[in-house]
Amino acid sequence: MIDPNFVFSQSNLQTFEYCRYRFYLRYIQHLHWPAQISASDTYQNDLEAGTGFHQLIHQHFLGFDRDLLLEQARNFPDDRLVVWLLAFLACPYAKLTRKLFPETTFTAQIGSHLLSAKVDLLQITDDGNITIYDWKTSRRMPSMPNL
């Protein structure tokens, strides 16, 4: 039985889709599925670089100094981070304006269930249009249905 206060998220719903038993153990029984013993260094490095990139972009939209962000990226162990940050800073998305909400979590009630979602960046324009931006750092572009 799922706790009535359980909050559904992209992560736990993805776990449910991948393996219902893993979902049951982790979110119902509160047991953590052991990490893959043979998880590669590449996987771990990619995860850390992606997290670092998201943190830098978050700080960019909070107004942190560009040179400070570049210094942080240059000091990061993975050289890809500075390349990604420079590419981002050169693109139009780095210059977005209006109401911007980086790394914001939204929660809604659907029926008797809570659904939570965290977005990389939400923009609200003067005419009330909303755009959600999601930064991807994976080695392969996700399929359109997954996006």
Image (cartoon, rainbow, N blue to C red):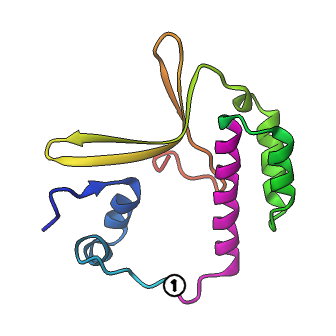
Is residue 112 left or right of 19 when viewed as pictured?
Answer: left
Image point (86%, 52%), residue name = 71
- Front residue of 13 and 121: 121
Kind of element beneath mark 1:
loop
- Front residue of 140 and 54: 54
Image point (24%, 48%), residue name = 114
Look at the image and say whether residue 125 sits in the magenta stretch: no
| Residues shaded magenta | 36-60
Image x and y of residue 115, in percent: 29, 47
Residue 123 vs 107, above or below: the answer is: above
Residue 7 in which image quadrant: bottom left
- Front residue of 68 and 131: 68
Is residue 128 left or right of 42 when viewed as pictured?
Answer: left
The quadrant of the rendering that contains the N terminus is bottom left
Image x and y of residue 120, in percent: 55, 43
Look at the image and say whether residue 53 sits in the magenta stretch: yes
Residue 112 vs 14, above or below: the answer is: above
Residue 110 vs 29, above or below: the answer is: above
Residue wearing tag 1: 36
